Amino acid sequence: MQSSMSCIRAMTAQDLSTVMEIETAAYVHSWSEGNFRDCLSAGYELVICDLEQQTIGYGVMSMAAGEAHLLNLCIHPQKQGRGYGRRLLNHLMQIADQKNVSTVYLEVRASNTRACTLYHMAGFNEIGFRTGYYPSGSVREDAVVFARSMLNSNS
């Protein structure tokens, strides 16, 4: 991996305007800048994926009591499908492993088949379903709940 190609680094407050551009390009019902600021203030793991010195994605993960929750993983829509999300996810799994997390959880829109495939390939298992979890116009969309055991993991 050459540094000119892509790198993963810690997110800072200076990244928030670019993160918001990606967030709103990727999601109709996006997080607010305040959501990201709150995660930074809370000490969550926030990482940025840069490609040739341009931010193309990010991830947000909380950790407590030996568990982690992947709250947001996003690659700019124009850069999706090229393995950057997988690299970002693998990086976050390594952080969870280093911090002795036993299980990582996440929710994903049931309609997001690309993300579901990524999580399955990364060793996550479907463990549940949340009805009406996500806003989606006048109705709400269901979420698939995933979990991955980190015990004896080789992220």
Image (cartoon, rainbow, N blue to C red):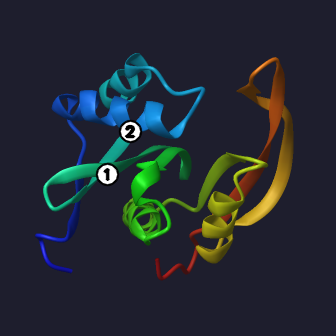
The reply to whether residue 109 is visible in this rendering is yes
Disc 1: which residue: 56
Q: Residue at x 55, y 80 (%)?
A: 152
Q: Residue at x 60, y 68 (%)?
A: 118
Task: Tell me if residue 43 can be seen.
Answer: no
Q: Looking at numbered disc 2 in the image, what kind of residue is underneath it?
A: Ile
Residue 68: image x %, image y %? 54, 50
Indicate whether 40 appears above or below 47: above
Asked if labels 2 and 1 touch by Cβ distance under 8 angstroms, the answer is yes
Residue 65 figure quarter? top right
Which numbered tag is attached to residue 95? none
Q: Position of residue 115 (x, y in %)?
A: 63, 59
Q: Find disc 2 in the rendering and name its residue.
A: 22
**Of the residues shown, which amino acid type is indicated by label 1?**
Ile
Q: Residue at x 81, y 17 (%)?
A: 138
**Relative height, residue 91 to residue 151 (above, below):** above
- Could you tell which of marks 1 and 2 lies nearer the N-terminus? 2
